[in-house]
Each structure stands twice: as C-alpha cells, then as structure tokens.
Image: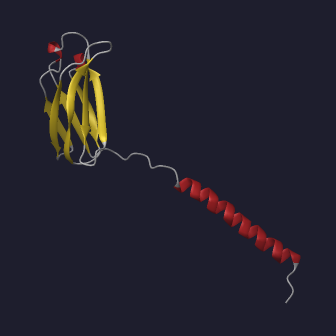
Amino acid sequence: MRWSPVVVCSRLLLARSCAVVAVCLAACLDEPLAPGPSAARLIVGWDPLACGDPHRVALELDDDSGARQSVSAPCNLGGLGLGISHYGIYRGRIYAWALDAPARTSTPVELTIDQPIVEWFVATPR
C-alpha cells in the first residue's frame, strides 16, 4: 500500500497539533491553585480607649501543620478579623508593636476554632 503525501502530511500535522495542545495544557496544570474561601472567621476585640500611645496590635497563629496566619490593625480600631483556613487548634501570640519603638510584651495564645465565627475579647495589648 502506498501512502500519498497528503495523508502523510495530515498525520504529521495532527501529531504536531496534539503535541502543542498537550504542552499548553501542561502549563495550565502547573499553575498554583488560588486560596479557597475561609472555613471560619476569628474576630478579636479589645478596649480602644485603653490603647495609650499609637501602636498596632498583631496576631500570629500557627496550625498543627505549622502554617502561619497573621494580621494586624491599629490599636484605636478596637478589633481585627482573620480568615481561618480550617477548623482546629491554633497556637501563637498577640502583641503590640510600633515603628522605631522597643519590643513590647507578647502574650501566648491557644485557640480552638470549631465554629464559623469565633469572637474573642482580650485585654488591650500595650
């Protein structure tokens, strides 16, 4: 059986097209996934009238796998919110900080996130 040049060329073109499509799709699969929605929300509150000098309040939490989540807000706002990726026990610290100021005390924390919204009222970090 003889192969005509048209059949050979069309098969080569089809193979080359499939290879190009496969390379393009592989590039799409290599892209990192976007973060999903938070499973829970932690709302932290304190008395903004007890803040004193202007500073920020920061919260750093680590889950059991060591993934860190953190957030900070000006003290005079009286609160902050943090999207929590999954339910579980989180350990970390809450502390006050200001630019060009000496280190302030930090308070170790351990929180159990077991609801979609967790509210936590703390003494004003100074």
Q: Is residue 50 left or right of residue 73?
A: left
Say which residue appears at 87% left-offset and 86% top-offset.
2
Foreground residue, 26 or 65? 65
Q: How many numbered discs sit on the rendered protein?
A: 0
Q: Is residue 122 left or right of residue 14?
A: left
User: Residue 86, relative to residue 91: is it above or below?
Assistant: below
Q: Is residue 94 left or right of residue 31?
A: left
User: Residue 92, relative to residue 76: is it above or below?
Assistant: below
Q: In which quadrant of the rendered view does residue 8 lie?
A: bottom right
Foreground residue, 16 or 103? 103
Say which residue appears at 24% left-offset and 37% top-offset.
61
Specify the quadrant that holds the C terminus.
top left
Position in image of residue 5 (x %, y %):
88, 76
Q: In which quadrant of the rendered view does residue 40 lie?
A: top left
Position in image of residue 76 (x %, y %):
23, 16
Position in image of residue 84 (x %, y %):
27, 42
User: Residue 61, relative to residue 77: is it above or below?
Assistant: below
Q: In which quadrant of the rendered view does residue 16 lie?
A: bottom right
Say which residue appears at 29% left-offset and 26% top-offset.
72
Say which residue appears at 11% left-offset and 23% top-offset.
123
Specify the quadrant that holds the N terminus.
bottom right
Position in image of residue 85 (x %, y %):
29, 45
